[in-house]
Image (cartoon, rainbow, N blue to C red):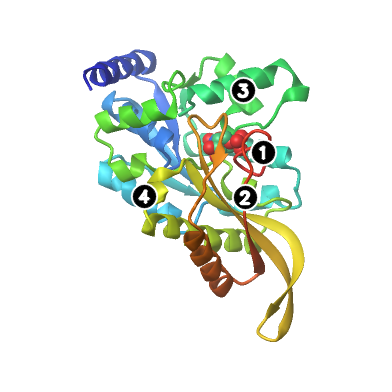
């Protein structure tokens, strides 16, 4: 406790020194890292504009939840609704890496459009992101995925000294501890990680509104099951991913020919490796029944029992 309070003071002093009177733009997603970052910038008295980019790839009700959470913490944020811009840019694109690059670059365009005169871009990059991107940089062939905060546009800004990443030496559990010392509510700090490119990486193939709606509805049911049965805080991350493969089923007396949904729940220390969680069959059964009853467009529910490696946590 003592050490974390000292650390909090040091990190705030360091931000103050680096920022000075510069105009800072900070993207907030509502996730743990960017929330802690936004609160740190506020505590450091930075001249900051916190932008919540609603890229249309968020989960059900997520925008409202994020705005309510920031209001609760007294941190002002601005929402930029650009779902159409992102979905248009993604139309016809089915390559996972292309999707990531398009989304990462569009984030920067949106920030710059919103805050034309920003001198610094603040990001909640953590230590594992830095390690993964360093090993990625060694060889293009071994590159696994481009994280949204590591696209070329950002690397260029970084070379110009315009990127501020105060959390870059920390692991997730340390960020959560720092968040507690900053007085951020527990439920916000315990939110599962959610990738910057959002549901686009949980929607293999082309991203469409129809697919996104199915993913949102299934995800919502699964996550609520985990919360209701006390499993949400015990797992590192959980979500639903669309499997856009049509299979034959029966609905009523009719033949159906629809996609499948895959549920995933993993435990991990730092997202570099992960293991799937042995959720109770009763929980899986309830989630599956509710999904198959309430969500149209799918007729099959799968549970992903793959470790990382060789799988990764996300499907793309
Ligand atoms: P993978 O799928 O590589 O994911 O095993 C490891 C962790 O990183 C998250 N993830 C991202 N987070 N921007 C982020 O902020 C991204 O582009 C991104 N891609 C993956 C993923 O959800 C998991 O927690």
Note whether ligand 1 is within 8 Å of mark 1: yes
Q: SS at mark 2?
A: loop
| Quarter of the displayed picture in which ligand 1 can be seen | top right
> Which numbered marker is on residue 311?
1
Q: What residue is pinned by disc 2?
A: 304
Q: SS at mark 1?
A: loop
The quarter of the displayed image where residue 249 is located: bottom right
Residue 6 versus residue 209 in the image, above or below: above
Q: What residue is pinned by disc 3?
A: 133
Observer able to see residue 108: no
- Give the image location of residue 288, x and y in percent: 55, 65
Contact, CB < 8 Å: mark 1 with mark 2? yes
Residue 237 versus residue 161 in the image, above or below: below
Distance from disc 1 to disc 2, alpha carbons, whole Å, reads 10 Å
Which residue is located at x 62 percent, y 50 percent?
304
The quarter of the displayed image where residue 134 is located: top right
Q: What residue is pinned by disc 4?
A: 67
The single residue placed furthest to the bottom in the displayed view is 253
């Amino acid at each position: 406790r003592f050490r974390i309070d000292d650390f909090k003071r040091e990190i705030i002093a360091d931000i103050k020194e680096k920022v000075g009177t510069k105009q800072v733009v900070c993207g907030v997603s509502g996730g743990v890292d960017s929330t802690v970052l936004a609160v740190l910038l506020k505590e450091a008295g930075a001249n900051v504009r916190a932008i919540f980019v609603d890229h249309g790839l968020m989960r059900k009700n997520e925008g409202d939840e994020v705005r309510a959470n920031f209001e609760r913490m007294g941190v002002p944020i601005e929402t930029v609704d650009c779902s159409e811009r992102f979905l248009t840019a993604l139309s016809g694109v089915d390559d996972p890496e292309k999707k990531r690059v398009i989304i990462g670059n569009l984030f920067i365009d949106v920030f710059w459009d919103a805050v034309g005169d920003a001198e610094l871009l603040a990001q909640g990059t953590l230590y594992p992101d830095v390690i993964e991107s360093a090993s990625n940089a060694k060889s293009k062939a071994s590159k696994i995925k481009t994280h949204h905060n590591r696209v070329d546009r950002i690397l260029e800004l970084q070379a110009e000294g315009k990127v501020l990443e105060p959390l870059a030496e920390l692991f997730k559990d340390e960020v959560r501890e720092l968040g507690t010392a900053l007085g951020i509510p527990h439920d916000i700090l315990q939110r599962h990680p959610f990738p910057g490119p959002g549901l686009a990486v949980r929607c293999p193939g082309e991203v469409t509104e129809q697919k996104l709606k199915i993913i949102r509805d299934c995800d919502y049911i699964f996550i609520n099951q985990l919360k209701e049965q006390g499993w949400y805080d015990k797992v590192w991350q959980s979500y639903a991913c669309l499997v856009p493969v049509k299979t034959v089923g029966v609905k009523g007396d009719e033949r159906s020919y629809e996609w499948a949904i895959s549920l995933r729940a993993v435990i991990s220390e730092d997202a570099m490796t992960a293991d799937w969680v042995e959720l109770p069959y009763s929980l899986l059964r309830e989630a599956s029944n509710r999904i198959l009853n309430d969500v149209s467009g799918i007729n099959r529910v799968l549970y992903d029992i793959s470790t990382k490696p060789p799988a990764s946590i996300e499907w793309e």
